[in-house]
Amino acid sequence: MYGWIWRHLPGNAWVRALLSIVLVLAVVYVLFQYVFPWAEPLLPFNDVTVDGQ
Amino acid sequence: MRLVVRTFSELCLTVGTLIVLFVVYVLYWTGVQAGIAGAAQIDTLQREWAATPVPAAPGPSPARVRPPYVPGRGIAVMYVPRLGREWKWPVLEGTGTGVLKKGLGHYAATGRLGETGNFAVAGHRRTYGDPFKDFPRLRPGDAVVLTDGTTWFTYRIDRGPHRTVPGDVAVVDPVPGKSRFDGPGRYLTLTTCDPEWGSSHRLVVWAHLDATQPVTDGRPQALDS
């Protein structure tokens, strides 16, 4: 999977490394901004009220 | 064969990294965000309070109409000396997930701050700044101090921490169940989850209004003792 991505990135090794870092940062950003905030309330840390549910 | 092994190990690595990142998010990043959001809420409240000057007449003025609470908006700032000298969090209206990410939440159906009834507040035990991490250290006699910009309200804890089940909604009643309060009064209830990282139970403390003073008289003594 990662080898496939590496082979399909354009440019020489330096450009590919730079693009890889940008890709990793983009993935982390999406995870922290969208995926984790969605997943976190599914865990029990949010249940702090008495509501009978 | 080699391709299968490689893909499998790459998958394991990816899942492992994901889990580590998620733990970082839950343990650290939610706290950073809640700290920023909480401070911003306190800022907003203080700016609103500065814009509406305190009435010149000292003492509580019953004639003054207090605005209704707006869902998701700040109501007051809470201080609990037992939880730390620097411990202060905004109390917002409502107890939805989004509200509790920014501070403590006031149960919408319960009483108003300082008035007869039960001002009930929920907060995170863990994650989102861990506001009620040390909840079990609260003891009868501890002060819970709130300000709404015009008045300081000093509540004193009477009972707790009491462990109960999530369905025990009577603990936020106007005269809270199991609190041993025997009639209507100006009460305060705090709730959070128990165990620390779980949700099988709730911890509750009850307090009664002990003293009020206008903000023009300075900070209440309970904050500095």
Image (tube, rainbow, N blue to C red):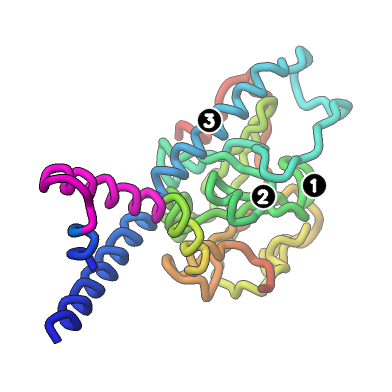
Name the secondary structure under disc 3. helix
Image mark count:
3
C-alpha separation, residue under disc 2 versus residue under disc 1? 15 Å
Residue B161 appears in the picture as rendered: no
**Number of the label disc, if any, that sits on residue B47:** none
Letter of the chain that mark 1 sits on in the rendering: B
**Dominant secondary-structure state across the stretch colored magenta:** helix
Say what amino acid the circle numbered 3 marks. Gln
Which of marks 3 and 2 precedes in the sequence? 2
Q: Which residue is mark 1?
A: B116
Q: Specify start and end residues of the magenta stretch as a single range.
A: A8-32
Q: Residues within 10 Å of mark 2 (few under 14, many from 20)?
A: many
Instruction: Work out whether mark 2 precedes mark 1 in sequence or the reverse, and give the earlier one.
Output: 2
Callout 1: helix, strand or loop? loop
Q: Nearer the viewer, residue B206 or B225?
A: B206
Q: Amino acid at mark 1?
A: Thr
Q: Earlier in the sequence, mark 3 or mark 1?
A: 1
Is B13 drawn above or below residue B186 in the view shown?
below
Most extreme residue toward the right is B63
Please say if the residues under marks 2 and 3 sit with CB atoms less than 8 Å apart: no
- Identify the subunit bearing mark 3: B
Relative to residue A32, is residue B115 drawn left or right? right
Q: Amino acid at mark 2?
A: His
- Which residue bears the numbered disc 3? B221
Residue furthest out toward the bottom: B1
Residue B185 location (% of width, % of height): 77, 51
Position above or below: B39 against B129: above
Mark 3 closeness class: few <14, some 14–19, many ≥20 residues within 10 Å:
few
Observer-nearest of A21 and B201: A21
Give the residue pinned by disc 2: B106
Question: Which residue, as the protein is rendered here, is positioned at the far top?
Answer: B56
